[in-house]
Image (cartoon, helix red, strand yellow):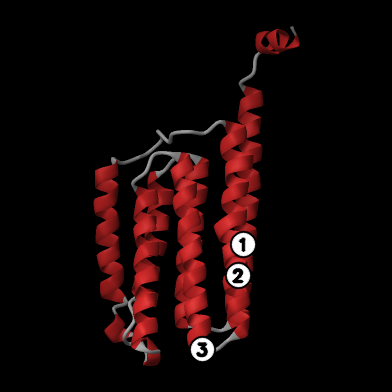
Amino acid sequence: MTSAYTTLLNLASVLILLFAFACLGSKLFDRYVGYYAIQSVLLSVVAAIVAYDLDAPALWALAVLTLLIKGVGIPVATRRYLLARLSLKRDAAIALGLSTTLIIGAVLTGLAYFAMRPSTLPGRLLDTAAVPLAMAVVLLGGLCMVVRRHTIAQLLGWLIVENGVFLGAITLVATFPFIVEAGIFLDLVAGVLIMLALVSGLAQRLASASADDLRRLNG
């Protein structure tokens, strides 16, 4: 891997990590989704960089699918079918303060980089920081799932974990069949979680409705 492509790969990976921190430090659901969308677009850029460096047409297809599914499809579906229908604006159900959460996230990032620093990686990955940054993204997504109590926020944390796994897989493994199988599995799980969140939210709305409310709606 040449120095120019390594620089681009590291820069994209750093930006993906920064948007994971942005999700961790925000309380607005719409921003959660926006940060995840930008992170996914950057992930498609990483796939394109690896595809160009390895001269792998199949990875180009993966980059396009990542852009369409993760960068566009999932954010649009989340905004339309979850945030709009459930009228979600601000996440107040947070177990820890934002400052404490960000400090824990910084510690986890340092641990991830120390455990998987570039000098411990094999072969062509000796000069890239993408793999430890991918592990840090996975840990930040897991932290988001732990400190957030709202189902939708936890779902977005899972999607961040998925992006971290995808980043590590495409950088470390770079084999198209493995990445496709892992990505499809995680996307299916994310789709199921979105449907469960929607059904759960609608069920809670219906369960809290009273007969008086229904009579007023009837006129």
Q: Amino acid at mark 3?
A: Leu
For label 2, count other residues whose C-alpha is less than 10 Å away and answer few (under 14), some (14-19) or many (20+): some
Q: Position of residue 57 (x, y in %)?
A: 61, 84
Q: Is residue 140 above or below residue 6?
A: above
Helix, strand or loop at label 2? It is helix
> Which residue is painted at 31% across and 41% down in the image?
96
Judging by the rendered image, the residue that carries numbered circle 2 is: 64
User: Counting other residues with Cα less than 10 Å from the Cα at mark 3, is it few (<14), some (14-19), or many (20 or more)?
Assistant: few
**SS for callout 3:** helix
The residues bearing labels 3 and 2 have C-alpha atoms spaced at a distance of 16 Å
The answer to whether the residues at label 2 and label 1 have Cβ atoms under 8 Å apart is yes
Residue at x-position 47% and y-position 49%: 34
Amino acid bearing label 1: Leu
Q: Which mark is residue 54?
A: 3
Location of residue 202 by image quarter: top right
Q: Is residue 135 left or right of residue 167?
A: left
User: Mark 3 or mark 1, which is nearer the start of the sequence?
Assistant: 3
The outermost residue toward the bottom is 123
Q: Residue furthest front?
A: 4
Q: Which residue is mark 1?
A: 68
Identified by mark 2, the residue type is Val
Q: Residue at x 40, y 89 (%)?
A: 1
Distance from disc 2 to disc 1, alpha carbons, whole Å, reads: 6 Å
